[in-house]
Amino acid sequence: MSRDNQFFQELCAVMPEEGRVLQQEPMKNHTTFKVGGPAKYFVRPKSSEELAEVIALCRERGCAWYILGNGSNLLVGDKGIDGVVISMEEGFSSIRIEGNCVVCGAGALLSRIARTVWEGALTGFEFAAGIPGTLGGAVVMNAGAYGSEIKDVLAWVRVLDAEGKVEVLPASALGLAYRSSIFQENGMVVLEAGLLLEKGNREESRKRMEELAAARREKQPLEYPSAGSTFKRPQGYFAGKLIQDAGLRGKQIGGAQVSEKHCGFVINRDNASAQDIRELCAYVAGEVERQFGVKLELEVKVLGEWF
């Protein structure tokens, strides 16, 4: 038996149910950009115990592993990922309300959380209703919109640490800053989090979410695949305004395009490859730096192999 087949069998022993361990799974089916080659292994653990076993096995066998939420902030190379992609969507999507605290699994979609919060007559999470990601990804990136961020409502997280132990950390220990946290460097995996909200008025919350949804439809290219805001906001500037002022509205490389509706978005306009998107992002960043001396940093995470 080859090493690859042996490793596949070992993964299947951890998760024996059919369909929970896949080989050569196209990542374009799991990213909002709708691009990306196949993951060598794609797994769906249902518990923190299974997750810990998978990660331990990857470390023992020297196999790279990556945590996947909704794939909404991810650009995967056209050659795919030579490693294990661990999907959190199936076993980590629970949501429950405990008083003013909403306890959510890392794989819970922010839109689902927002609706559950609204149904429970709580307020403070309206800003996240339209963010197309999961709570785990939002914590790792300290996601935000319309002047609010996850750190504003996050109370604690339950994590799997680098040694495979589960522990609970307060939000104050997470180094949450603009689109960053300690999770981007320390190897911990977010399993669950508690959001501390306030009692609210359901009608007022509904109106606020509808207002924000209307603003998104008006200003953002939701009709095309994208990863949301492509670049981080530079200190003292707005990325979209810099890109527009550089004359790059509608700039296209292959099937990738700078959105004509919002220049802060690079979109998959016409069957783009991941390479098209990557090249366009590099071109945009280069032009903005050349014209204005401002360096744009990708907000989107780039992963995988490239031709």
Image (cartoon, rainbow, N blue to C red):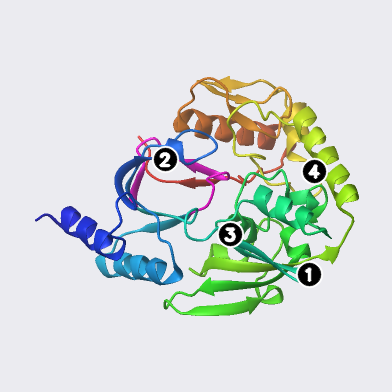
Q: Mark 4: which secondary structure?
A: loop
Dot 3 or dot 2: first in sequence order is 2
> Residue at coordinates 67% horizontally, 30% vertically from top-left?
222
Q: Which residue is mark 1?
A: 100
Q: Identify the residue under disc 3.
A: 136
| C-alpha span from label 4 to label 2 | 33 Å
- Type of the residue with mark 2: Met
Dot in front, 4 or 1: 1
Mark toward the viewer: 3 or 4 = 3
Q: Residues within 10 Å of mark 1 (few under 14, many from 20)?
A: some
Circles 3, 2 touching at the beta carbon (< 8 Å): no
Whether 230 is among the magenta residues is no
C-alpha distance separating marks 1 and 3? 20 Å
* Residue matched to label 2: 27
**Span colored in magenta:** 68-83
Local SS, label 3 = helix
Measured as percent of width and height from the top left, residue 169 is found at 62, 78
Can you say which quadrant of the picture contains the N terminus? bottom left
Front disc: 4 or 2: 2
